[in-house]
Every structure is written in C-alpha cells, then in structure tokens.
Amino acid sequence: AHDTDSTPSPWDGSTINLGGVQNTGNTESSSFTGALNLIYNKDRWMNTLNLNGQYGRSDGETNAQMYSIENKTQYSLNTVSTMNNFIYLDTDTVVNPFNSYDFTSTLTAGYGRDWIKNDKYTLSTSIAPGYNQSSVQNSDTIDDSWAAVGNINGIWNISSSAKLTDDSKFSLYENYWEVTTTAALNNKISGNLSLVLSYSFTYFSEIPEGTDYTDQVNTITNVSLAYSF
C-alpha cells in the first residue's frame, strides 16, 4: 500500500500466503500451508516477523504438522543504502512433531551486510553467535547448546512482475549442524496478488537416537497465492 503522494508505506514487502492440495480417489490426502510475513521499516530500524504453518492428512491420519515463528529486529549502522552494515537480534522457533527434532528454538545476535542492493539485485549476508534449545522426537527432555548461525539472502527482480528469492541458513550447534535453503519464484497475477512456487531443502548432519524420523534430508514443494500490502 502507498499513500497518495507515493511515499512508500513502512509495511512495504509484507505478505500473506495461502496454499493447499487435495487428492481423492486411490489416495485420500490433503495439505494446507499458510504464512504471514510482516516487515516494518522506520528510519534505521527494520523489524521482520515470519509466521509459517503446514498441516497435512492422508487416509484419515495426520502426516504433516509444522509451525514456526521468527522475529528479527535490525538496526542500520549507516545510511548508505547500497552498502548497508547492520546489527540484529533474531529469535527463531520451530515445532514439528514429524521431524527428528520436534522442537528447536534459537536466539542469536550478530552482524550483517548488504553487499548488493539496487532495483535489480539484492545480496546480503549475516553471522551471529547465540543459544539454542532443542528436543528430540519421542523425548521429554530439552537440550541446551551454543549456536552459530550464518545467513545468505538474495533477490533477483527478473521483471516488473516476477522475482526470484533464495534464503539460506547455516546453523551449527554443539551436537549437530543444519542447512536450510528456500528458493521461491514470485509471479504477479494482478494488483497485489501473486502466484508463488517455492522449494525448501533441509539437511541434518546427525540424526539422534530414539526418533521415528531418520531421514537426514527433508524437502517441501509448495504452490501458494500471496497478497502483498
């Protein structure tokens, strides 16, 4: 949304995403995804809140259930928009009963830099130490660990109606490390409405003993509609 004088809204870039798949016949299954991405810019401050959810059923039984919340508060150290240095505080919590780690929560504080920031491309990196809590599926205990997290975020504005984004996170903990990358193609349909095709890849270096879910690689392919405001 923009004011009548074309001044950008501080909420520019915020989106709501909804997606779903329904199968009938030989396979009775359904899955739904939703996401809320709120971005607020004020002078040198920027706050980003991400809420994500996934729910799936197959043949009458739940087979996917994931919820996550991440909040990042960022402060710019300078006013040069093309070479922006910033510090930030990030909290990231994921609950997923169908994963080897059914609960993880990480608090980090670190430094980042926008290496490229123009109308066509954006590339930023960040690194931060922190603290992590995690719980193994089928376990009632929560383990504490130090954390080191690095991020690489890129945007390619292909045209006035299409853009490609990639967000990669590298997380190192005391007992294992994890890599997550999400690539998304956003194509504007009309006005504030877009079609989004995304692919997420997660790799765990170690699978803990006692869990029912032993795959080190997990992927999510999602098609959704996004409304920007």
Image: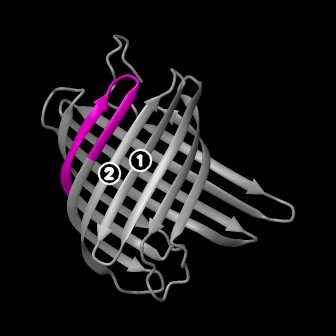
Position of residue 4 measured from the top left corner of the image (x, y, whole percent): 37, 12
Kind of residue indicated by mark 1: Asp
Magenta stretch contains residue 216: no
The magenta region covers: 109-125
SS class of the residue under badge 2? strand
Q: Residue at x 82, y 59 (%)?
A: 24
Contact check, label 2 and label 1, Cβ < 8 Å: yes
SS class of the residue under badge 1? strand
Instruction: Write down the quadrant of residue 136 in the picture.
Output: bottom left
* Residue under label 1: 167
Is the residue 46 above or below the residue 151 in the image?
Answer: above
Q: Residue at x 39, y 20 (%)?
A: 2
Relative side of 148 to 161, left or right: left
Is the residue 55 above or below the residue 80 in the image?
Answer: below
Give the alpha-carbon distance from disc 2 to disc 1, as whole Å: 7 Å
Q: Residue 151 got which mark? A: 2
Kind of residue indicated by mark 2: Asn
Q: Residue furthest right?
A: 25
Instruction: Write down the quadrant of residue 10 in the picture.
Output: top left
Quadrant showing the N terminus = top left
Q: Residue at x 41, y 72 (%)?
A: 103
Quadrant showing the C terminus = top left
Instruction: Write down the quadrant of residue 18 in the picture.
Output: top right
Label 2 or label 1, whichever comes before in sequence order:
2
